Image (spheres, helix red, strand yellow):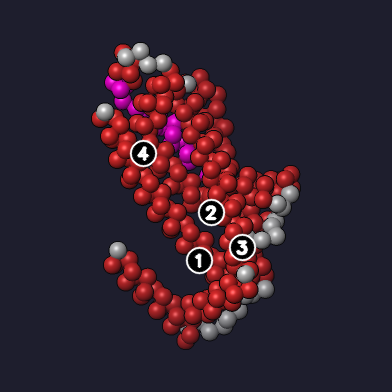
């Protein structure tokens, strides 16, 4: 942790010196001090809060839908070879499809409101959860399943009491990957059509050569990504402790 803080401080100092004495054209570059002043100005007017609330509402709703649908689809694919044979090709195709090619269509179909952004986040974030959940289900130790069946557990009980707890490391790894992709989805959706949001802030700042405001949007998203990934890691650590106790019982 200490080394991370030192490296960040060194980077900020180097960035400030570079912006003050080397790249002095403010149309193309801005030192951290200017970025901080821009953030304070946007915050004092309430504009930054509006963009943050808009983007994170879209991200939250999209991620909730992505996690729920991703786990459900992943479990179905994991327990049914027939379903996996029919659907795996579509998951692979959609996972590999560039989001830039899909976002304009969703905005055209659903408008520039929150629904299109939530759908972009959903389509961006759902596939890591699906793929990891399916892999986790298939990686479950067969002995655990046989033990559950020997105690007359039905299919639903096997899934909820054995398969899902055993696949939690895979599911949570998929969620961590989905967080980063979801943030990218928010930005892409707002770049193609929005009335507010951090992606909208980045776009308008870039069009008006307001580099400090552009950096404010970028670093707000980057900070959110770091925070959400850390929270997912903490949740993963605590959940895996619960999973280990559950399997031991």
Which of the 4 image quarters holds residue 192?
bottom right
Q: Please give the residue where the numbered disc 4 appears in the rendered image.
A: 169
Q: Earlier in the sequence, mark 1 or mark 3?
A: 3
Q: Number of numbered discs present? A: 4
Q: Tell me how far mark 2 sits from mark 3, CA to CA.
A: 14 Å
Expressed as whole percent of the image width and height from the top left, the position of residue 246 reads 30, 31
Q: Please give the residue where the numbered disc 3 appears in the rendered image.
A: 51
Q: Residue at x 44, y 34 (%)?
A: 133
Check the image and report above or below for 142 versus 208. above
Quarter that holds the N terminus:
bottom left
Q: Tell me how far mark 3 sits from mark 4, CA to CA.
A: 34 Å
Q: Tell me how far mark 1 sits from mark 4, CA to CA.
A: 29 Å
- 1 or 3: mark nearer the eye: 3
Q: Earlier in the sequence, mark 2 or mark 3?
A: 3
Check the image and report above or below for 180 versus 170. below
Q: Residue furthest bottom?
A: 21
Q: Earlier in the sequence, mark 1 or mark 4?
A: 4
* Mark number, residue 183: 2
Mark 4, other Cα within 10 Å: few <14 / some 14–19 / many ≥20: some
Mark 2, other Cα within 10 Å: few <14 / some 14–19 / many ≥20: many
The residue segment tinted magenta is: 124-144
Which of the 4 image quarters holds residue 26?
bottom right
Which of the 4 image quarters holds residue 206?
bottom right
Q: Residue at x 32, y 14 (%)?
A: 151
Foreground residue, 225 or 128? 225
């Amino acid at each position: 942790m200490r080394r991370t803080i030192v490296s960040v401080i060194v980077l900020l100092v180097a960035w400030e010196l570079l912006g003050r004495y080397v790249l002095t054209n403010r149309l193309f570059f801005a030192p951290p001090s200017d970025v901080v002043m821009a953030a304070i100005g946007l915050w004092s007017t309430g504009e930054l809060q509006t963009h943050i609330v808009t983007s994170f509402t879209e991200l939250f709703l999209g991620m909730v839908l992505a996690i729920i649908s991703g786990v459900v689809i992943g479990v179905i694919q994991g327990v049914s070879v027939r379903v996996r044979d029919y659907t795996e090709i579509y998951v692979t195709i959609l996972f590999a499809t560039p989001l830039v090619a899909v976002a304009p269509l969703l905005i055209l179909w659903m408008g520039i409101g929150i629904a299109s952004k939530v759908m972009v986040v959903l389509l961006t974030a759902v596939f890591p959860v699906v793929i990891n959940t399916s892999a986790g289900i298939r990686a479950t130790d067969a002995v655990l399943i046989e033990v559950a069946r020997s105690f007359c557990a039905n299919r639903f009980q096997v899934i909820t009491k054995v398969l899902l707890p055993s696949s939690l490391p895979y599911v949570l790894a998929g969620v961590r990957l989905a967080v980063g992709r979801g943030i990218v989805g928010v930005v892409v959706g707002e770049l193609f059509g929005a009335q507010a949001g951090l992606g909208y802030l980045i776009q308008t700042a870039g069009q008006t050569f307001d580099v400090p405001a552009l950096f404010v949007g970028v670093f707000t998203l980057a900070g959110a990504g770091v925070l959400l990934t850390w929270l997912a890691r903490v949740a993963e650590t605590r959940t895996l402790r619960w999973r280990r106790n559950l399997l031991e019982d």
